[in-house]
Image: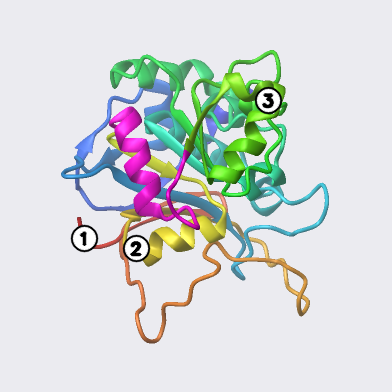
Amino acid sequence: MNDHRLRRTPLATLFAKSRGKALPLPSRLARLYGEFRMPVPRWRPLVFGNFVSTLDGVISLKVPGHEGGGDISGFNEQDRMVMGLLRAVADVVIVGSGTMEGDPQHMWTGAAICPELATDYAGLRHALGKQQPALKVVTSMSGRVDLSLPGFGGGARHPGRVLILTSARGAKRLAGQPGARRVDIQVLDAARASPGAVLGAVTRLAAPKRVLVEGGPLLVGSFYAEHLLDEQFLTLSPQVAGREQDDGRIGFVMGRQFAPQDPRWATLTDVRRGSSHLFLRYAFARTG
């Protein structure tokens, strides 16, 4: 997708609550997205998630070669722009090992998802006082991740600082790989990577203000379970993917069930439109 098309297709703001602080977007990003506000974090980092979903709630087709969000959005350039924007304002980007496996060549930066706007994302980070790329955090209690992948520095491009949170057994497995020196490895004292433990480890290392959780659905579900997801960005793609019984197609929260006993209700705070795609933003009551 070329840069000229991106310049011609700004999002239309249909509804926006005036909340938080307006961020200093470079002129081209401001033209494409509009005003972008984020709450000022207190007590703990602001934690927000981002997904693209079909009309029928599918976030991955679970077909080899078609597992990523591009097939869900139709490789929509405005969705890529928003993904890059959210990564640009984040101090930390958290992904699960399963998400890494689904898109093994990805770098998990704004420039990687929308290279046309790499300079603009860098300018925004500079204006926010962020001199380094966002810390990338990968959770894998098994330690079964391939450190030769580009996202771990196994290529020509530098991914920035990478932290892997794992178990003692997982740390031993990771230490046996040649790329272990390129990443930070920390052991969590738990059977699973709970969101509280993940945020604790990240906060001690990086003191972040904003944390972006990009999945997968099991990881995001655990953040919802502990009331640690403050905002959800959701691109609604005008596609119906369909499901067969037991075909593995998933929604953006898995492994947890909340309703009807303990539902998670949100407040709609922002709606933008790009052609037939809707860009939705929700806020959840903050508990800490």
Picture residue at 71% right of the left edge, 46% below the top? 102
74 vs 62: above or below:
above
Say which quarter of the image contains residue 245. bottom right
* Magenta region includes residue 25: no
Q: Residue at x 28, y 17 (%)?
A: 129
Q: Nearer the viewer, residue 108 or 141?
A: 141
Q: Which mark, by number, is residue 287? A: 1
What's the residue type where badge 2 is placed?
A: Glu
Task: Tell whether 262 sits left or right of 44.
Answer: right
Q: Which residue is mark 3?
A: 150
**Between discs 1 and 3, the one toward the N terminus:** 3
* Quadrant occupied by the C terminus: bottom left
**Observer-nearest of 108 and 24:** 108
Residue 226 - label: 2
Residue nearest the viewer, comparing 132 with 243: 132
**In the rendered image, is residue 197 in sight?**
yes
Residue type, mark 3 in image: Pro
Where does the image place residue 105, in percent across and percent down from the top left?
72, 32
Q: Which residues are magenta?
A: 187-207
What secondary structure is found at the residue carrying circle 2? loop
Residue 199, position in %: x, y? 35, 45
- The dot on residue 68 is none
